[in-house]
Image: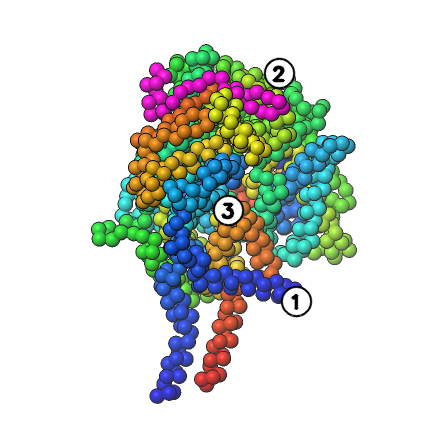
Amino acid sequence: MGRMDAGFIKQMIPFAPYLVSGIILVVLPFAVPPYFRSMLTKILIFAIFALSLNLIWGYTGLLSLGHAAFFGVAGYAAGILIINYGIESFWLVAPAAILITTLVAALFGVIALRVSGIYFLLVTLALGQLVNSVGVKWKSVTGGSDGLPGIPFPALGLSWFTWNTTYFYYFVLLVFVICYFLLYRIIKSPFGHALQGIRDNEPRMQSLGYNTWLYKYIIFIIAGSFAGVAGVLFASFLGMMAPQHAGVTTSVLVMLMVIIGGKTVFFGPVIGAAVIILLEYFSSIIVPLRWPLILGGALVASVMFLRGGISIYLIKLWEKVRSGYGSFKG
Amino acid sequence: MDVLGIQLLIGISYGMLLFVLASGLSLIMGVMRILNLAHGSLYMIGAYVGVTVAHLSGPWSNFWLAALVAGLTGGLIGLVLERVFFSRLYKELDGQVLATLGFVYIFENLVRWIWGPLQKMVSPPAFLSGSTIVGGLTFPTYRFALIVIGLVTAVGLWLLVEKTRVGAIIRAGMDDREMTGGLGVNFGRIASAVFFLGTFMAGFAGFLGTAMSGVSPFIGMPIMLLAVIVVVVGGMGSIPGALLGAMIIGIIDSFGKAYFPDLALFTAYLAMIGILLLRPSGLLGRKEV
Amino acid sequence: MRKKRVSKIIVGVCLLLLLALALPLAIACAPKAAEQQVIKIGVILDFQGAVAEFGAFNEQGMRFKLNEIGHQVAGKRVEIIVEDGQGEPAPAVDKARKLVEQDGVVIMIGPVMTHAAAAVQQYLKPFGIPYFSILDWTPELLEQGTVFMTAGTGDAYSYVLGYHAGTQLGYKKAAVLYPDYNWGQAQFAGFRDGFTAQGGEIVQTFPTDIFSLDFAPYFSSLKDEVDVLAFVCFAGNMPIFMRQYKEFGVKTPLMLLKGSVISTEVMSPEMVADVGQDMQGILTAEAYSSYIDTGTNQDFVARFESKYGQRPELNAMMGYASLTAALETIEKTNGDTSPDKLMAAAKGLKVELPHGNIEYSENGMGILDIYIMRAEMRDGAFAWIPVQKYEQVNTYILHEKFD
């Protein structure tokens, strides 16, 4: 009896962090003040966004300075479809917005992947700023620098259901879990392993017969699509979209999330999203005008001192707990 | 001289300002392969320090002295950045990008903290103030001065790079850095000197620009983007390229503002992407070895 | 070794932040009972962006009012919670969310920037609380019925200016320079309507970036036939604007749309020395100047000056006015802070101010006097001197009033 229990528990141990985090995420809204629920939602949305960036950055070694372009395009697409074209149903708007974003990613991918190194950085920067300037100048469609206000919560077509911030949190949580699961499968698959191979030594992968360009292109598009998912959620969350959501500042924000969370660990960006959004909140209370200083400082500090991100430490902590437990039981 | 001609002059004078700024960036990117996205911030900091000096009373309020101080500020901060950060991030492009982007935000907020959010202005020296009549139309004298300053800078830099021994080392280093070490040259010191020169140009350009159209704490990112576009279009490491690129971008900007306000910035980014795709080394750049 | 220690510090900070996520902020959700006794008014101001200097003045006027009434309204203690909207829509909405959901404010005031206000108004829709402007916003914000525009709509001032230019000054052709976002566009539209109503013609328009620093392309292409150049310029740009105006040999008379953005209090001494002289003679239309000649106004100015060491400029007065309006709304409901009662009380509210009255119509429009003012140097200080008053201007009936 005892031996079976020990074996079963030992099998469940790897899942423990997921279980605990899951319980926390489900229960948390009730333990925090209403304003914090919005913040949790924001964290989950940016977690998806940051995970998508890590697909190309941490796992494939491509840093894009314009990743927010996809975030912005998706959010704007959703907003424009709802407000300008009167298409209300979420079941139409969301897939359409994500499809549009995927097509944009396909286009940008062809352009960006023609070059590498410093030029790749510059092209992605230019593409991101291009989307930003379209958002500013195409006033009739995007509302210009005023932004596009009045984006509602997703219209699910369920007459008995009305939204509030708590329901929206659970909706975002559901989407987050699905995305996390999907992205995890992608990374753990042979495709994902090939990407890491390309990151570490592309010529070698090529010599092994891999069409590395195609792999990079596909993951670039996938990353863009998932950023788009985050963008659609964000549009409803904030109730509006503004051109800066597609620009370099938003790209930098999500880069910081990935680097602080850790780009070598799968869940790293999630941690990073939580840390940065909390940091933003506290700095707006304590030192309201100094956020850019803190953001910049965090970026420089992370680059100089925090190579693996904090997730490495969390994993080490977990390993210690595990081995401690194991030796006790074993 | 008609209105179009004046617009052209405006574009050229603005382009000259961009050139002084971008030439520094071009050298740094070409020689050291460093992507310093804080270059625009150094423009801004140099401008603010220069303006503060220029507004002091007494013998300090000399325009050229302030311009020199502005340049030195840019150069010194640049040198600190290079010694402390870039030397540790050599060949790590991602790290350089992130760290320098971090500095853009840091510098913007620090300047805003110290000097406030409003724009600052400075007057050109007396003999360059006011206007000149050109073919019946009035044009600010200072902008003519900018054109001259730009040309002098261009010639000076070109001579340095093409005709001096130091320049030869720089050019060799652009092509193959390791080789120069093998030839017994201390490239590290030359590299630091180039970085200093490049960032000096940034601060200097900042002060010059302030006398033309002012400066604000938020100008760092936009003007860095313009400088990057100029360098990409013209070609990394090429002084004539930076000049050509700056002229193109300056003219697009000023014609755009006057006649096609919706398109100017858009066009500049398209030009940059186009060049990166068709001829990554830029219009006049050295081919990648 | 040092690198390791710094990374440990960073990790520690991050873990602390994450703990803060797990532990609810007790302070935030603490004694709600005690808070019932305090009425909170939410204020979003612009401390950054194009009108970064306004925020401090708005707050000045509001705090002055709070002191005047001893922080009491309808028998209860009243507080304002001031947040920085950064002059942009997204941060303003963020702050609005905090003020409503975390602080429980019963009335919202500001910000000044219209595009930020439009976004905040969308957010406030489901909550139904009265939303007061400090200055003017654009007319479409009135459509919801939840907004009260303390200083009317922006186009009222430019309309009056345009009307004045056409009728009183006899100008026939105008050019307009304005920042290209909804507020700037409304300024342009107002001037155009007022000017063309008298048969005038707009021959050139110059839409600029919000942060435009270089006016050279516009001055150089300004046509000679233009009788007057109507323009919008934020305080920090004024010296550059005037310098380039002279550099390009432009002689066209100037009319400043929304002169509130320029005042002695806003301009640094260097700026005043730089452009004060050059700016003399520029006309504008505005709701208030500390030089308005009534006894009560001069009294107010004296009191204000003795407290703050500077005259009340338009933003300070409008901060004072908007808070006065919010407070009188609460007085009218006898301290009942339920949204519908407050909303009903605000409609038709008449607020008495040192220089005149503001009345809020049924649809939330602020009806007030508009003054044509001329820029002058008085005792070395830059001053807006009223030269003509247009009484009780209501934008909705603007066209009928002046035709």
Q: Nearer the viewer, mark 1 or mark 3?
A: 1
Name the spot of residue C104 as percent of width and height, x first: 38, 49
In which chain is the residue bearing label 1? C
Pointer 2 residue = B135
Pointer 1 residue = C1
Rendered position, C180 above or below C224: below
Asked if residue A168 is among those painted magenta in the image, a careful observer would answer: no
Q: Decide which of C361, B108 is in the foreground and name it.
A: C361
Pointer 3 residue = A248
Q: Nearer the viewer, mark 2 or mark 3?
A: 3
Give the magenta part as a residue range.
C374-403
The image quadrant where one finds the C terminus of chain C is top left
What kind of element bears circle 2?
A: loop
Viewer can see residue B269: no
* Callout 1 amino acid: Met
In which chain is the residue bearing label 2? B
Name the spot of residue C185 as percent of width and height, x first: 42, 29
* Callout 2 amino acid: Gly
Secondary structure mostly seen in magenta is: strand
